[in-house]
Amino acid sequence: MEKKIIAIIPARIGSKGIKYKNLKKVNGKSLVEICIKNAKNIKGVSKVAVSTDSKKIQNLSKKQGAWCEKLRPKNLSKKNSQTNLALLHTLKEINEEFDYVIELQPTYLFRRKKTLSKAINMLLKNKKYDSLISIVKIQDTSHPDYVIQKKDHQLKFKSSATNFNRHYLNARYKPIGLIIISKYENFIKKKDMLTGKILGIEITNKKEMHDINNPIDLKIAKLL
């Protein structure tokens, strides 16, 4: 039986790094419009929704064919508001049951169709897993092997950063918000997209990792 999958795009109007970030345009389209278009082109996604507190984003989203009938409440639209609660609000308003929920941040402008399709298929095939998140390999001096401890004025570290060679590092990863997927029932019950047994899909494409959080990121995105 084919699974019902909903992709929800969190796109509040406020932003600390860039004013009205989700409405900024690249190649004539806003970040939220690009994200909607990409989500609608993914096989298996039965509904695309946008969670926003902005009338302008709401109108743009509906024109692009995304569900955005109700605005997100102000108490869920603050800078410290939890995205999980905003997604839950959207699901409550839609009032449909799904098998999986995908969170797609619009700031990842270069998310590829094949990456998202691969992530969905990974979770569908591995039924014992409850959620999935995109991860990238740590290959610089922020790696745990190079963490420096300080006691009084003395420094202690496992390996000297002056002898740094990423080829000899133990494999360590960090999460990025490119793709997050959860089983619907788990998310509704635990109010968290990442629960139970969690799969990681490794992202290796540098362009795809690019996240727009400040004006420099936006300029780079336009150049790319």
Image (spheres, rainbow, N blue to C red):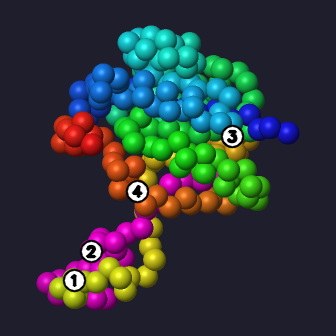
Are the residues tagged 1 and 3 within 8 Å (C-beta)? no
- The residues colored magenta run 130-159
Q: Which sits earlier in the primary sequence, circle 4 or circle 2?
A: 2
Q: Considering depth in this image, is 187 or 168 the residue closer to the camera?
A: 168
Residue at mark 3 to residue at mark 4: CA–CA distance: 25 Å
Q: Which residue is mark 3?
A: 100
Q: Position of residue 78 (x, y in %)?
A: 37, 29
Q: Amino acid at mark 2?
A: Thr
Residue at mark 4 to residue at mark 1: CA–CA distance: 26 Å
Q: Nearer the viewer, mark 4 or mark 1?
A: 4
Residue at mark 2 to residue at mark 1: CA–CA distance: 7 Å
Query: What label does residue 141 carry, if any?
Result: 2
Dot 1: element: helix
Placement of 181 over or under 170, stated as above or below: above
Q: Considering depth in this image, is 153 or 196 the residue closer to the camera?
A: 196
Query: What label does residue 205 carry, if any?
Result: 4
Are the residues tagged 3 and 4 within 8 Å (C-beta)? no
Q: Which sits earlier in the primary sequence, circle 4 or circle 1?
A: 1
Residue at mark 4 to residue at mark 2: CA–CA distance: 20 Å
Residue at coordinates 50% horizontally, 61% vertically from top-left?
202
Q: Residues within 10 Å of mark 3 (few under 14, many from 20)?
A: many
